[in-house]
Image (cartoon, rainbow, N blue to C red):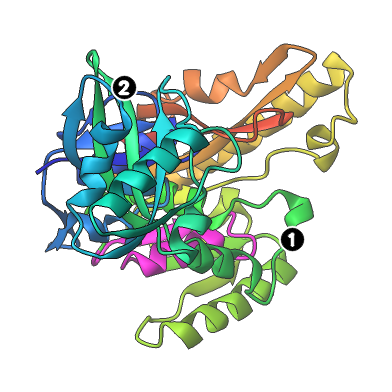
Amino acid sequence: MSYLFFLGRSHTLAYQELSVFFPTSSQISDTIVEVSEDSFTHNKKQLPVKDALSVLGGTVKIAEIVGSEITLTPLDVAKYFLKETNRKLTFGISSYEGVQKVSERTNREIKEILEKEGRKARFILPKEHAILSGVAVSKQDVLEINIVAHDGAFLISKTVVLQEFEEWASRDYERPFYDSKKGMLPPKAARMAVNIGLGDDAGGKTLLDPFCGMGTIPAEALLEGAIVMGSDSDKNAVEKAKKNDIWLRSYHTTLPPITYFVSDATHVSQQIRKETIDVIVTEPFMGSPKLGEGKITDPKEIKNSIKGLEKLYIGCLKDWQKILKPKGVVVIAIPQIVLANTKYSVKTVIDSCETLGYTNLLGPLPYSRPQAVVRRMFYKFVKL
């Protein structure tokens, strides 16, 4: 049995996360991945494929491949709905990778075929483009068929599980403290970075976020089963992170608390014992908010900001050498500034990676809105 994993917007980052748990997966396209396994390993437990969405942050849907067609007549598609035993069903069709949106007329013809076979049927149509909204599929209990063009034919798959959008939104917006104006890393992106850092077995590993802010990355690492520490130079942010941790553990009562403390990220080794950290996952200071707002446009001023960030990140990586275990991992978001079609990168940090005592394993893995001025580029470093 094979499955299609449909990746979210940041598909490069999402695919690297998926590969942690499904290393033999293969990409059909940038946003669609085929997985042949029926199960995967997570924290030394073997779990069914459908449980992968409780672990992954970057995959929005998993569908079981149920067939392949050369043509897409109403009867070609209707036969997949007829395999369902329900006498009453709501169906919908999503089209991907160059497949035209299935028209309302074709949906009506499919409905007529189903009704001739004694099924009571209704359908829903995509509101935008050719893909049904996950919210609509979930809320209306829709049997969704996905059509993907591949190798001169059409792969037909049936949706088996969708990302729990309400749970993700809750951890983002219902926690006591969050600040959308600061461009904080969303929980889904934090989970992807955490999984890339921890691998498929988080149990017993100690993860530190030395720019923890209000605790998004530590929270996702805790949910994945790691021992978690967070620090920040901003005392107020740390206090808010502690309260967010209490809120999270009120819903997940078996979780241990996160250890939070105040520290400059370039001197965190003064508060943590030597070679005790397995993984550092962090989004560091990314520059003045004015950069993100596009209010700094002078190239000289931008380059000076880049130099300041380079100095900060190099100072951090030097200090983190002391606390990371041998082969310890750093997953870090490094900004790329895009203004007037010119890209400014914090290049020196990447170029200096080996002289700082790290191997660059992955990156850049982008995570940003298409029109963002400051764009996150994730890298995975391993201590030499």
The span from disc 1 to disc 2 (Cα, nearest Å) is 41 Å
Q: Give the numbered dot on residue 179.
A: 1
Residue 29 or residue 302, whichever sits in front: 29
The amino acid sitting under disc 1 is Asp
Q: Position of residue 161 (x, y in %)?
A: 32, 57
Q: Which residue is mark 2?
A: 149
The amino acid type, in three-letter code, at marker 2 is Ala
Q: Which residues are magenta?
A: 203-226
Q: Looking at the image, can residue 327 be seen?
A: no
Q: Is 320 left or right of 345, judged from the image as shown? A: left
Q: Residue at x 78, y 36 (%)?
A: 292
The answer, for residue 268, to whether it is visible in the render is yes
Q: Residue furthest front?
A: 116
Quadrant of the image occupied by residue 65? top left
Number of numbered callouts drawn: 2
**Residue positioned 45% across, 32% down in the render:** 102
